[in-house]
Amino acid sequence: MTTKSVSIFAPAKVNYTLKVTGRRADGMHELDTVVLPLDIADCVKATLLSEQKCENTWRIKGLADNEELGLRAARLLALRAKVRSGVSLKIDKQIPVGSGLGGGSSNAAAVLLACNRLWQLRWPLAKLAELGSEIGADVPYFVYCRQARLRGIGEKLSFVNSPHAGWCVLCVPELVCDTGMIFAQYDRQDLTKRPFADKIADAAQRANDLVGAALTLHPQIGEVMNAVENIAGNVRMSGSGGTCYALFTQRKSAWTAAAQLAELPMRVWVSRIMQGRSNKLGSGQVVRQRILAPSCVGSNPTSPATFTHLYEGSAKAKPGH
């Protein structure tokens, strides 16, 4: 039976560490970063079209179609695979745009996985990841979506042998961090060698080289960092910002901290750290209007949780990856 539609979760991520190790002749920065997937996710739905076109039925304000990574992914796969049919994309957005959580790249990877199934291409993950590298540096990572160490511009990927377990409390200020502008600011200043007078920001920068540049362009990130550190006792920044997060080994401690942080003017999520695609996606919950929604079932994780693609549609399908 021909599959008419496929839905796949597109998880968020945090950078546990991020070091800028160099800059290539083409201007791209080389990184060394450890990336952890979370159980907060967008949901990408791909519906088969009989006509040969790719379209999306949702919009991000101010973003043109040719800039939206998911649609670019579908069009590129259709071109390279010489597909005769088309696809209509719908994305249920939960991951904030421009927050350093990888939502756009994760959407693109999920589109590749969904269209691979929808168009019955049977491309292996390695081939999809190679194609994804033409769309964005983080897209190959999200094709595999495992706890991993990425080097170079993301093409050197190795899975973490001793995976992290626990919970994240994510604090997202009301701003959009432009990755290109953050790296440009990083290049203008020797930020890795300049300690901050603020000990919290200095400690966060030791884990993520881009903290200094983010704080220079968006000083309010510093206010979020101080709030998280004061309540949770630890703080890091993900990617190029502006999401700041704290790590917890116990679910109860994470929710206690989230309840206090929810009193402040920023979005707060509680999320479980995932190992990779295997069983079932959890349900990271947003803390809205000071109400704590139920979190994942279970107490203190002794090992990282795992998840798989969620497929829905006219034909039940196994991931097969």
Image (cartoon, rainbow, N blue to C red):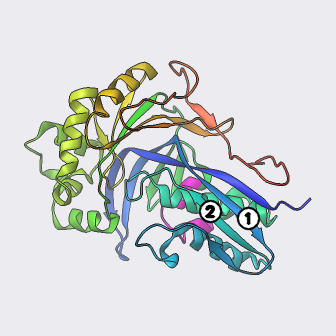
How would you rate the neighbour count of disc 1 (Cα within 10 Å): few for under 14, some for 14-19, many for 20 or more? some
* Mark 1, residue position: 47
Query: Compared with residue 190, is residue 306 higher up or lower down, i.e. above or below?
Result: above
Q: Is residue 73 left or right of residue 262?
A: right
Residue 187 visible in this rendered orientation of the protein: yes
Residue 191: x and y, percent? 17, 56
Where is residue 228? Give x, y as percent. 26, 34
**Residue 59 x, y percent position in the rendering:** 51, 68
- Residue 276 image point, x, y percent: 60, 40
Pointers 1 and 2 in contact (CB under 8 A)? yes
Q: Residue at x 43, y 29 (%)?
A: 292
Which residue shows up at 74% across the image and 63% down it?
116
- For the point 68% across and 38% down, the residue is 278
Residue at horizontal 50 percent and vertical 35 percent from the top: 273
Q: Residue extending furthest left?
A: 197
Q: Give the extent of the magenta segment.
A: 129-142
Real-space CA distance between mark 1 and mark 2, rounded to the nearest whole angstrom: 8 Å
Amino acid type at mark 2 = Lys
Label annotation for residue 22 = none
